[in-house]
Image (cartoon, grey):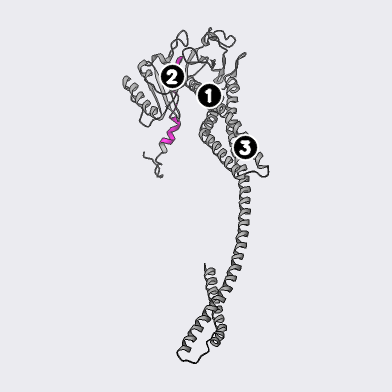
Amino acid sequence: MTTVYPIPDNHAQRFALHNEVHARSSLILGLPLRATHLALSRTGDEKLYERHHLAQLCERFGNTPPAADADHFSATFDTFQLRWEQHGEFSTYTFYVQGTEEKPFASPALKKVPIDWLSAMTGKVLVATHATILPVTDSTNTTTDLSAVSPYFASHPIIGSTVTGGAANVFTDFRIHVDGFSRFLIVDHNLRVEQGARLLHRLFEIEVYRVLALLAFPIARQLSPELKKADQQLYTITNAMTQSGGDDTKLLEELTALAAEIENHISSNHLRFAAAEAYYTLVERRLVDLREVRIQGIQTIGEFINRRLEPAVNTCRFTSNRFKSLSERVGNASQLLRTRVDIMIERQNQRLLTSMNLRAKMQLRMQQMVEGISIVAITYYAASLIRAMTQTLQSLGVHVEPEVIEGASIPFILIAIGLGLRRIHHIIKTTTDAS
């Protein structure tokens, strides 16, 4: 792209990042309309297959398929419109059909989609919901009378409110009906086309993120007994630490095993609990975006969701925080016990060094005694050799006195041996100091 100003070259991702804000813009839909929203959990292989599956639908109707690296796609087919988005752990399909029937949910938008293509979809359904936007009439004016919409929800208790500054009323019962789908009914008082598309998108996101946030709740309930067990085990170990005469090494092994078990639970479930927190935040933001105003006599969508979703999310938070707290307590107990074990080992080493020092002194005394005996023995043998030599000389005719020479040589032999030992001690000391 050329510019009229001499500015530096564009960053390689400048335009992609700039246009990301427009990547998921709402569809321009005429009102009234019907919509069906599906949220499917997908594995890695299923995510690769769904692009091929989506390309088959485009090929059937002569549309251009999404790019190989695309994570969202919108297109208009013969009788319906499709919006597809691929997220980290799920994908969503929203099908739109303009116009309404006499009964809002008698002919949902999904009926316009080829059955054989739907039957080839992979994944597991997280959310399946129908929605209808109806124009306000005498029969659908719910300002004062809700009996007109009650049959559409099998006479279940209705939740709803006035939204988007009074431009529409939204009703639901947050139940899965006999067809396997939940329902949203929107009564259009003064919705603009863009408002209708955004409102549908927000309602679908609330439903999807609400379910995704609750995925952590069964895990939290499953981990509750494990938490109690680990907490009791930690109490037993710390109580034993206060008793004298215990086996600290054994307690440290038990603490290490407990710490490993707790860290395994944290590592295995941290992502799910963090995701639940993020999804709950998104639900709260989408509820704020609705700008709800109460309809007398029924709960608003925000009230209903908060009263039922918030306790479950708080349970997940409590479980996650309790595991982290337990991990810190185990770490503190392990540190204290390691200090005690280190002190005990230090004392044992000190006693061992003292014992080795005493043993070394005893060996030195014995060595000195052996040296004294050795000096006497060496002197005796050296004097005997001198005597034998003088006796040999005497037998050869030399006039010598062997006994006299032997006795006179003893002092010189002692001096020579003493000087030799002194030299040996000096060599040993020099070698030891050098090392």
Name the residue rendered at 61%, 65% in the picture: 362
Residue at numbered disc 3? 234
The amino acid type found where label 2 is placed reads: Leu
Is residue 153 on the magenta stretch?
A: no
Q: Nearer the viewer, mark 2 or mark 1?
A: 1
Sooner in the amino-acid sequence: mark 2 or mark 1: 2
Q: Nearer the viewer, mark 3 or mark 1?
A: 3
Mark 2–mark 1 Cα distance, whole angstroms, equals 26 Å
Residue lying at the far front in this picture: please name it: 395
Span colored in magenta: 16-34
Residue 294 sits above or below residue 49 on the image: above
Residue at numbered disc 2? 29
Q: Is residue 389 left or right of residue 226?
A: left
Mark 3–mark 1 Cα distance, whole angstroms, equals 36 Å
Label 3 element class: helix
Between 401 and 312, the one lying in front of the other is: 401
- At label 3, counting other C-alpha atoms closer than 10 Å, the crowd grade (few under 14, some 14-19, many 20 or more) is many
Instruction: Estimate the x, y position of residue 111 in percent, counting from the top left.
Output: 40, 13
Residue at numbered disc 1? 210
Between 242 and 225, the one lying in front of the other is: 242
Sooner in the amino-acid sequence: mark 3 or mark 1: 1
Between 84 and 81, the one lying in front of the other is: 84
The amino acid type found where label 1 is placed reads: Arg
Between 343 and 425, the one lying in front of the other is: 425
Instruction: Estimate the x, y position of residue 380 in percent, counting from the top left.
Output: 54, 78
